[in-house]
């Protein structure tokens, strides 16, 4: 009968799994990519507006007004395309609300025109954007605002069947928006979460670290990053199989997550390596936290601690912490090494 590894024997199972920090969900698409996507949607709106003007459209259409709106959409599209990441997330959210107003203005320009329902179909463009990048709550608020705005301009259009047209527009945009939002949220979770432990992965961790680094620098708070390697993890896999190793990773992750503060972020970088973000924490308190983590599990680990300086970057901190962790393992494992200084013999 196979021997049970010490790290797994007779420990109560924890029912509360390690959780990812909410900010991780917003890290899949960069600001530059978001702006390019916004530019594409504005460009589609511009081309659609021009086609409405150039193609036969019957009477009752304010061509001058539509021309101004289409030209404005083109200007925003070009600006978004060339500015890229310089246009922040908040600015893009504002532009999506501006798009809602632009479509509503275009509908007003087509009052009493047979193409009013066709123009209203452009509401799907800002809906796709908000579904892709808004939080669920903000997206729901947007849908309510869109339904109210489109109702105000369509139901007063004077076109026969306007109420039916409004119902179709709302039903279509809500359906498309919800499908896009659900798929986008699922993709974000899949892209930013380690499936084995439920922790954020390296891809999600680095943007979170960048934001916290900026925040702590602004508040003049300390910040520490820790790279942690489980000791003798390969021996567990070799002796008891990868399933036992996976179980060990899950149990250690849960134990550590339940010990950390809600502001701390624990990520699995890959294999048996973890990265820990400790905002508003200096190196001394970081070492104390590692001692507490060592007390909640039988599995030993080696750790390297790097404290942020005035000009530290994400790459600097991760490199320093990783180098310190390597030195900790070389020193005999079960130690903590602080970058630019070593605390010898600190057992964890």
Image: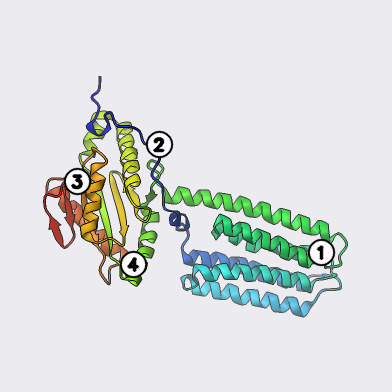
Could you give the CA–CA distance between mark 4 and mark 2, rounded to whole angstroms?
33 Å
Image height of 12 relative to 262, above or below:
above
Question: Residue sitting at 57 percent across and 49 percent down?
Answer: 182
Mark 4–mark 2 CB contact (< 8 Å) = no
Q: Residues within 10 Å of mark 2 (few under 14, many from 20)?
A: few
Could you give the CA–CA distance between mark 3 and mark 4, rounded to whole angstroms?
27 Å
Could you give the CA–CA distance between mark 3 and mark 1, rounded to whole angstroms?
68 Å
Q: Residues within 10 Å of mark 3 (few under 14, many from 20)?
A: many
Instruction: Give the residue number, with chain letter if any, for mark 2.
Output: 15
Frontmost of labels 3 and 1 is 3
Image height of 317 relative to 182, above or below:
below
Question: Residue sitting at 12 percent across and 45 percent down?
Answer: 332
Q: Secondary structure at mark 3?
A: loop
- Res 249 → quadrant: top left
Which of the marked residues, 2 or 1, is nearer the chain's N terminus? Answer: 2
Instruction: Give the residue number, with chain letter if any, for mark 3.
Output: 348
- Res 151 → quadrant: bottom right
Could you give the CA–CA distance between mark 1 and mark 4, rounded to whole angstroms?
51 Å
Mark sitting on residue 100: none
Q: Secondary structure at mark 2?
A: loop
Mark sitting on residue 155: 1
Where in the figure is residue 81, as x and y percent of width and height? 53, 71
Residue 148 appears anywhere in the view? yes
Image height of 232 relative to 211, above or below:
above
Q: Residues within 10 Å of mark 4 (few under 14, many from 20)?
A: some
Where in the figure is residue 175, as x and y percent of width and height? 67, 51
Which of the marked residues, 1 or 4, is nearer the chain's N terminus? Answer: 1
Left or right of residue 17, residue 47 in this image: right
Instruction: Give the residue number, with chain letter if any, for mark 4.
Output: 216
């Amino acid at each position: 009968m196979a021997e049970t590894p010490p790290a797994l024997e007779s420990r109560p199972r924890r029912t509360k799994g390690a959780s990812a920090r909410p900010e991780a969900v917003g890290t899949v698409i960069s600001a530059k990519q978001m702006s390019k996507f916004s530019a594409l949607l504005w460009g589609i709106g511009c081309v659609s507006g021009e086609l409405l003007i150039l193609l036969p459209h019957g009477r009752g259409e304010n061509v001058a007004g539509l021309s101004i709106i289409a030209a404005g959409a083109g200007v925003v599209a070009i600006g978004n395309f060339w500015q890229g990441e310089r246009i922040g997330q908040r600015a893009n959210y504002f532009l999506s609300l501006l798009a809602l107003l632009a479509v509503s203005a275009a509908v007003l320009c087509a009052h009493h025109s047979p193409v009013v329902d066709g123009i209203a179909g452009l509401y799907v463009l800002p809906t796709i954007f908000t579904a892709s990048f808004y939080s669920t709550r903000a997206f729901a608020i947007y849908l309510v605002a869109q339904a109210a705005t489109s109702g105000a301009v369509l139901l007063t259009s004077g076109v026969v069947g306007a109420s039916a047209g409004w119902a179709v527009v709302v039903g279509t945009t809500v359906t498309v928006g919800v499908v896009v939002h659900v798929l986008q949220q699922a993709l974000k979770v899949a892209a930013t979460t380690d499936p084995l432990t439920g922790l954020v992965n390296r891809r999600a961790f680095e943007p979170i670290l960048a934001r916290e680094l900026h925040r702590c620098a602004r508040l003049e708070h300390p910040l520490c990053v820790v790279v942690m390697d489980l000791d003798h993890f390969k021996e567990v896999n070799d002796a008891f199989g990868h399933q036992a190793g996976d179980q060990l990773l899950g149990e250690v992750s849960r134990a550590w997550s339940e010990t950390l503060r809600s502001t701390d972020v624990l990520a699995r970088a890959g294999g048996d390596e973890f990265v820990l973000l400790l905002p508003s924490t200096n190196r001394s308190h970081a070492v104390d936290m590692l001692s507490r983590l060592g007390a909640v599990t039988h599995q030993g680990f080696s750790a390297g601690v790097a404290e942020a300086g005035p000009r530290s970057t994400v790459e600097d901190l991760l490199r320093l912490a990783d180098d310190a962790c390597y030195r900790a393992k070389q020193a005999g494992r079960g130690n903590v090494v602080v970058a630019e200084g070593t605390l010898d013999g600190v057992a964890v």
